[in-house]
Image (cartoon, grey):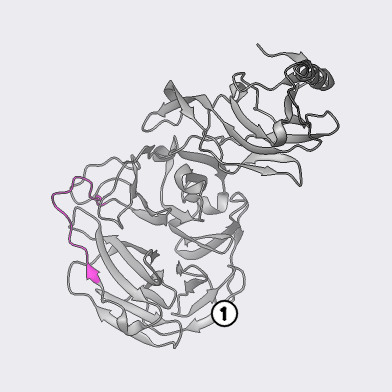
Amino acid sequence: MSNKHSIATIILAAMTLLSSCIGDDEVIVNYYNDVAVTTFSLGSIKHTVYTKKKTDPTQDSSYVETISYSHYPFHIDNTNSCIYNTDSLLSNTEIAKSLANISVKNAGYMAWKDLEGDTYTEFAATDTVDLSQPRTLRVMANDGSWYKDYTVTVLMHTEGADSLYWEPKGSDAAIARLSSIRGIRIADRLIVYGTENGSAKTYTSSTGDGMSWQELQTGFGTPVSMAANSTKGFALMNDGTVCSSTDGVNWSYETSNAGMRQLVAASTSELYAVGDGAQIITFNLKDRTVKTETLDGIFPTKDIQGYTTQIATNPEMERVSLFGNNDSEKSMIAWVKIVDNNDPKRSQKWAYQTPDNSSTHKAPALEDARLAAYGTGTLLFGGKGINENEETAYENIRFSPDNGKNWWTKWGNTQMYLPEGFYKTANSTAVINDGGHFWIICGGTGQIWKGHITTFSWQ
């Protein structure tokens, strides 16, 4: 049972007890006038785990487990007199009933200040304490001459680990008028482009907003196709002109008349577009040369898109991935190119990714398929199945951790699902990765969602 007293009463009682020990046994007690917290950790705490349905983000069922948090690091800031954890606890942890392990210099005395009033509860490692809000921990020198107050703050995630969350951002009338919509991110700008009654239109909003959209003017016309690398975005105009921007607002001329039909991806050193037939047109961003390659093999003719990811073992090399559909293949078609940004001569040629027919996790050919790199993999969703695929439109969103070889509707402990109501109203859609989050933006309805997987957004 916890004992509540004034801090002075606690110290006085302890000193009296120690003094009574001095006498015939000649026990010598040393008192110190300085004190500080030296270690702080939590013990075992109950944690509630919620499970979710495949297509419904509401909580379905739950169970309680006990987790030891003794390994979670806490930072002790003696300069600012505060203690806090550097790695947030899991959501739904019962921190109102926490056990704490605390050590102080020179055997000082400890007490928690009550949540209300100026009384203190003597610290005991076996007593739980409510740490659901910042608490004052007072430590006092064992000679009673000096004390120090620490503010103890326990940080806890508000979302469950390994989960997908959606945030509705309303709808926009201008975006609702778009068809064949696609999107990219440049710096802190979200950009969507498509057609309205046959005319090209482009709109932009900030990654911190997503609800207020303005028409984008590049100074070179209206983009009909766009791509981006890690530092710059590119736009292709109706007349073949390509311009670039580092902020999504100010645009500069890059090239024209390169025979580009649609931009698909950009690496640090090159810009990639499809030309006529199975042509890939590469524009070197350093020397401004243009190279055209005709790919020998199965090539996509619609829903063509791409993205670039860095090779983890070599930061100077990147993997450029191209995906799309045609009128016969039951799975999405994929091509890959490895680029050496330091030495283009060492870059590999485009390679067709032969489907693994034994895999049960291939990406089905979907109408209006859209994908984007996110976290350590790729997201994919789309409308109804085509080429004899019977998938219901917008029934699933998939994640691939291996560059499109396998696609999962449940990845690890994360159940993938589209926002409730999305499959009922979606028309043409765009997906944009802004780093920690991704956006799904719908033409036809103008509806906008911001999503994230906690595994990646917490990093």
The residue drawn where x is 44% and y is 35% is 421
Quarter containing the N terminus: top right
Is residue 361 on the magenta stretch? yes
Please say if 427 is above or below 237: above
In this view, the residue in front, 124 or 424, is 124
**Label 1 sits on residue:** 252
Residue 248, percent from left and from top: 58, 67
Image-quadrant location for residue 337: bottom left
Image-quadrant location for residue 148: top right
The residue drawn where x is 76% and y is 20% is 18
Magenta residues, start to end: 351-365
Q: How many marks?
A: 1
Is residue 276 on the magenta stretch? no
Residue 196 in view of the camera: no
Q: Determine whether, in the image, residue 330 is placed left or right of residue 246.
A: left
Please say if 345 is above or below 154: below
Amino acid, disc 1 = Ser
Residue 206, percent from left and from top: 61, 57
Please say if 75 is above or below 265: above
Farthest residue to the right: give it: 145
In this view, the residue in front, 41 or 311, is 41
Q: For the residue carrying disc 1, how many other residues have a C-alpha within 10 Å: few (<14), some (14-19), or many (20+)?
A: some
In this view, the residue in front, 84 or 219, is 84
Regarding mark 1 in the picture, which secondary structure is present there? strand
* Majority SS type along the magenta span: loop
Please say if 37 is above or below 368: above
In this view, the residue in front, 420 or 233, is 233
Residue 188 in view of the camera: yes
Residue 394, percent from left and from top: 35, 42
Residue 389, percent from left and from top: 21, 46
